[in-house]
Image (cartoon, rainbow, N blue to C red):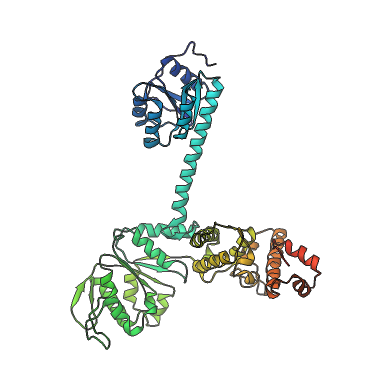
Amino acid sequence: MLNLANAPAEAPQVRLAKAGATRVLVVDDEPTLRRSVVRMLAASGMDAIPVEDGAAALALLERERVHVALVDLMMPKMNGLELLENLRTSHPGVEVIMMTAFGDVEVAVKSVRAGAYDFLEKPFRSNDEVVLCVSKAAERRRLLNRTEMLERKLEQKETFGELIGNTQSMQEVYRLAVGVAPTSSTVLILGESGTGKELTARAIHEHSSRANKPFVAVNCSAIPVDLVESELFGHVRGAFTGAITTREGLFESADQGTIFLDEVGDLPPLAQVKLLRALQEGEIKRVGTNETRRVDVRVLAATNVDLRTKIAAGRFREDLYYRLNVICIELPPLRKRRDDIAILAHHFLRKYAARQGREVVKISDEAMRVLRSQNWPGNVRELENAMEHALVYCREDTILPQHLPCTRHTLAPSLTEESDGNLGVALPEDLAHLPYREAKQRALSMFDNAYFTAVMRRTGGNISEAARQAGLDRSNFRRASKRTGRKLTG
């Protein structure tokens, strides 16, 4: 039983916290018990602060941080349950342990249901019981704080808008995009098809002061050459055959907002001249009139071609290039950021599982190795399509290599960018960094998966015919196939 004899006087309520010590607020209207609990916790290396009621506890928490609050259930003015409710609302980072006299256990259980970590019956059975309960509550709070911090850090690190990735190259993309978003500067976004150029443009718009205004995206290469000017800048009635009404262009539709010109390098010469004027003067002219109109539009442009080459060939204006290239953001191809493949694959799997109303399935280690070994010429867009394809063909709870559309290419096109020209053989990049024995084992496993998948597909799932074509008897074929994780029927 707790010894209350020779309890020291209460320490001041404002003190310097011991570095790294668990800080405990002791709230009880009995001075003797407060002092004894403070002494007990201090002997265990904790920093305990005594207060006499709920109001004093709330006032102290406004200026000091604590990890755990030991709260008496029965107190005047504000009882323990009322204080608990206040703490859950205004100080959710504090773990609460209720102290209750024998006979009030039912109310104490109610407090746990209301959000308290635990309760202790008075008189305490031992000092160790109190110290252990407080220590566990403090550890829980530390783990929760650490989890919340990591989740915030992970969210900041892995995403910007709908862009996903935490490799160094993507961090640089985020840094540039976040920096330029609040400005009105024109941005040129470079990258191969499927790398996320439009997603980058949308994220910049959404983080800008124009976020509540229109975002207009236009693929310049998809507009017929003779209609580009009309689409971008509008036309008046009778401007050309078929112009039966006056129509505003996309620049006017984007007024006060942002226009995203994808594949800007495909703009014809006259449209380039008009775009340059819009950037320089903030003015446009509809086709068929000399009347100018003021527009306030931020221009974000993108291309997957080398504009300098087009400039040298006389097919793109150099002055327009420099107007567009105020800030340049270059998106890396997926093969240059393989460490992001797992994050992206799981993201797309969750996305399409939700659309199909299915439980989120897992990706086997072998399937992930196949994903990481691909060159992904279609970049993130191709990976997204692959995960949707895999989910359609996966009927159980785990994506296997045979569910992936790229499985048949595992040992051929999925190569590193540099290969041994003498041998004419290239190794999947994911294996090239492993010790020889492990690399060989994984390569053989990948081959087995691809081989048995192909044979079973070719024979329509007929095991006897598949074994015959493989040159194995039925039992050996089954054993060899099982090593790859395939479940054979028939």
Residue 344 placement (x, y as % from top left): 51, 60
Count of numbered circles on the image:
0
Image position of 392 (left or right of 51) = right
| Residue 449 lies in quadrant | bottom right
Residue 306 placement (x, y as % from top left): 43, 75
> As drawn, which residue projects farthest toward the left?
291
| Residue 345 lies in quadrant | bottom right
Q: Nearer the viewer, residue 73 or 293?
A: 73
Point 51% across, 58% down: residue: 350
Which quadrant of the figure contains the N terminus? top right
Residue 56 placement (x, y as % from top left): 35, 25
Residue 393 placement (x, y as % from top left): 59, 66
Which quadrant of the figure contains the C terminus? bottom right
Image position of 193 (left or right of 271) = right
Point 49% across, 68% down: residue: 381
On the question of residue 332 being in view, the answer is: yes
Image position of 481 (left or right of 372) = right
Q: Nearer the viewer, residue 367 or 477?
A: 477
On the question of residue 21 being in view, the answer is: no
Image position of 14 (left or right of 154) = left
Q: Nearer the viewer, residue 487 or 48?
A: 487
> As drawn, which residue projects farthest toward the top?
6
